[in-house]
Structure formats: structure tokens, C-alpha cells
Amino acid sequence: MLHMDPSVFLYALGCALLAGLATNLLVAPVMRLAVAFQALDHPGGRRLQSGSVPRLGGVAIATGIALAIGAAAAARWRDWSVGLSRNEIMALAFGTLLVFLVGLVDDLVGVGPGTKFAFQILAAGLLLSVGWSFEVLRLPFVGEVHLGWLGGLVSLLWIVGVTNAINLIDGLDGLAAGVVGIAGAAFFLYSLRLNDSGLLADSNLAPLVAIIAVGVCLGFLPHNAHPARIFMGDAGALFLGLLLAASTILVGGRTADQFSGQTFFFFAPLVIPFVILGVPMLDIALAIVRRAARRTSIAMPDKEHLHHRLMRLGHGQRRAVFILWAWTAVLAGFVLAPTYTNEGNALVPFGIAALALILYAIFHPTAREARRAAVEADVTIEERVEELEEERLEEVELDTDDVVVLLEPPEKNGDGEAEEKPRPPRRRATSWPA
């Protein structure tokens, strides 16, 4: 059980609510801004949407986070100043600003992968310059490993890897926002557990950054869930990725003592965030191996990501996103449960849930129907899934006849009275996930 000061919890919750509300309210003006600058993703190629969608959602996300962290700093600057120097705060601010700006320019006019990679390394270098790095790793069956000069390299790879992992997984409506939200909530709970055990200082920013990321994602998701009205773009994905990477280093790099009394891998502050972010980290690892085997550039896009594979199994966008969200939640529960219960059998329900997810992904009736229909129609499964998605979307769209009835002036009968036209029946929306 946690023995947390209620005022601290309310403070963190208030910051998350502020971030979520600000992000949600900013989406509408940001969409108009994206249309004005023609920052739109058009259908075709690797794009799965049926129409043009604004891609400047990162502006709303970054602004929401900036407002929340600013309010948090104003409320508790005295506590922050105990554990953080001005240089550290400036390094985090400028590092996130760098990746946000390069992502924003990419969303507006396009930027080469080498330029984006260089900015990510520069942002990581700013964090390393103020001491945010892993010095000691505690690995399963190995124990403590003092990294020495390798600590900077490991930290650099971690920051750039997590940042790109979130960017790469942003391929379906709501996928990246949901994964970051779930991972942020899990990391917030893990940080609180460390704090309750006396292993994390009260002035550590990691729990606050994690819960603010959760708030932002919850505020953004109503606009980003399928069918998305706006995308977070590279600006939003890179910004969230760097924040998550920095917060894990704040915990992993500054937790001096082992978390004793737990299963072996809970001795490693780096391993838990790695498992929580297992879906995007696995996706980027497979992408690197796949592209290296083909001798193509690591930055070369393809349609072999985890979400593409799920769609080839016959799942629509919503169900594919739901499955990957569920996997993130299962992995988070798998690593968090023993830290709270001190019991190994707490892992059993998560093992069962993982098995159920595998069976669901492979044998779901609609997925099997899409695969069978694709074979019969001699089309690819992706094409058949897209057809099914379009059919479902048509069921929730407003009929054109209905629009005419609403806009046309009423006709008058012989007595000069308005005559009301019968309205066509509205069709029910299909249930989620589809």
C-alpha cells in the first residue's frame, strides 16, 4: 500500500487535468491552423484514412504539457529547487523544444530522417551534459553493472530509441496516444512505489511528467481515435517520446538502492520501463532487424509494423489499436503487480490475459471472415479490411437526404401553413471496437 500525502496526489492529478483540458480545447484552433498552412495528411500510400486529416496535433500536445508543467513549477518551485538545478530544467526544456521544432518543421514542409536524427542526438546530449544518464544497471542473474564511460552511450541509445519508438508506432488512429497514456500511468504508479519505499526523492520530476503525459493523451484521444479528426504528427510523437525517455532516466539514473524483496528483474529501474514500453520497443527492434536484413536504410518506411501485421490478420483499425493497447496494459500489469503485492502468483492473471489476447488476435470471427473474404475476392487482406472499414463508417455518417431536409425551407400547403417533410430513419452505429 502507498502512504502518499493526499495533497501531493491532488497536486499531480490537478496538473494532469489541466494538461488534458488545455490539449482538448486547443485541438479545434490547431485544426484550423493546419488547414490554413495545408499541413494535411492525404489518403494513399501508407495512409489508411479515407480523407485529408490535419497533422499538427503536436502543437496542442506540447502546449498542454507546457502549461501544466508551468503551473506545477509555480506551485512547487521550492520543492523542485531542492532536487533540480536550473541547468537541468533548462536542459529538459531546450531538449524537448528541439525535437518538437524539428518535428513541427517536418509536419509543415518535410525534413529528412538524418536531420531529425541529428536533432534527437543533440537533445539527448543536452540531457547527458547535466548528468542525466545511467551509471549503474542491475540486470537479472548478473547484479550490479557499473557502466563507467558506457553510461553515456547507453543513455543516448535509450533516449533516441524511446523517442523514435513512439514516433514509429504512430501509424493508426489513437495508437500512439493510447500506448503513451497507458505507459505513463504505469510509470507513474511505479515511481510512486519507489517514492513510498524511500528510493525516489519527493523533488523528482518523473512521476509528475508521467501523469501529465497521461492527461495530455486523454485530452487528445477524443479527437484522435478512429476515425481521427487530427494526427499528432512527428512534433507530438517525438515530444512525448523524449519526455518519457527523460523521465525514465530521472528514475533509473537516480535510484541508488535496489528495490529489494521483489522478483529478480525488479532490481533494475531500466528494465521495468523497457517492459512497460514493450510494444513500441519491440516494434522498433523488429524494424531495425528487418531493414538491416534487407540492406535498406533504417529510416526507410514500410508496412511491416506490428499494427500492419494485425491488419493483415484481418483486424480493422479499431480492433488492431485495441489489441496493442491491451498488450501495453498487460505488460504494465505484469511488471507492476509484484512490486505492489510482493507475491509471484500475482503474475498469473496477466499470463492468462496475454494468452487470451493471442487467441483473440488470431481467431476473432471477424478477422477470420476478412481473411476468407479476401481469398475469395482475390484481393489483399488489407484491401478487404479497408472495404469493411468504409462500410462501417458509412453506417454512422449522416445521410445526404437528411442534410437536405435540415437545410431546405419547409414547403407550404394550400392553407399557407408549413408542411413538415418526413425525415429518413437514422441508422445505428456499430459497436466499438470494429
Image (cartoon, grey):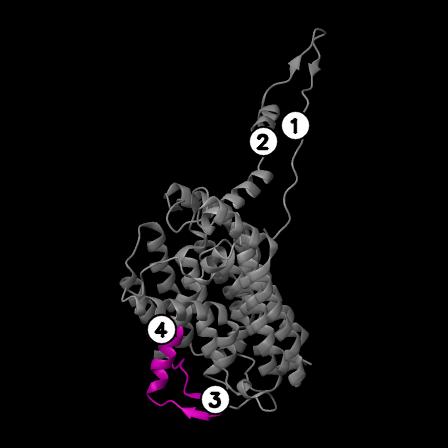
Q: Which residue is mark 1?
A: 424
The reply to whether residue 264 is in sight is yes
Give how far apart the Cα atoms at labels 1 and 2 are: 8 Å
- Identity, as a three-letter code, of the amino acid under mark 1: Pro
Q: CA distance from mark 1 to mark 4?
A: 58 Å
Tag 1: Cα neighbours inside 10 Å, few (<14), some, or many (≥20)? Answer: few
Foreground pick, 311 / 150? 311
- Badge 4 element: helix
Say if 432 sits above or below 8 in the image: above
**Depth-wise, is mark 3 or mark 1 nearer the camera?**
1
Please provide percent x and percent y for residue 296. Answer: 28, 64
The residue sitting at 45% across, 55% down in the picture is: 232
- Residue 399's disc number: 2
The span from disc 2 to disc 4 (Cα, nearest Å) is 51 Å
Q: Nearer the viewer, residue 311 or 334?
A: 311
Of the two numbered discs 2 and 4 in the rendering, the one whose residue sits closer to the viewer = 2
Work out whether mark 4 precedes mark 3 in sequence or the reverse, and give the earlier one. Answer: 4
Question: Tags 1 and 4 in contact by the CB under 8 Å rule?
Answer: no
Q: Over which residues does the magenta segment extend?
A: 131-160
Residue occupying the point 36% across, 52% down: 107
Q: Please give the label number shown on residue 138.
A: 3
Give the number of the mark in front: 2 or 3.
Answer: 2
Q: Residues within 10 Å of mark 4 (few under 14, many from 20)?
A: many
Query: Badges 3 and 1: C-beta atoms under 8 Å apart?
Result: no
Question: Would you name the residue on which mark 4 appears?
Answer: 124
Q: Which dot, 4 or 3, sits closer to the camera? A: 3
Q: Tag 4 or tag 2, which sits nearer the N-term?
A: 4
Residue 321 placement, left or right of 344: left
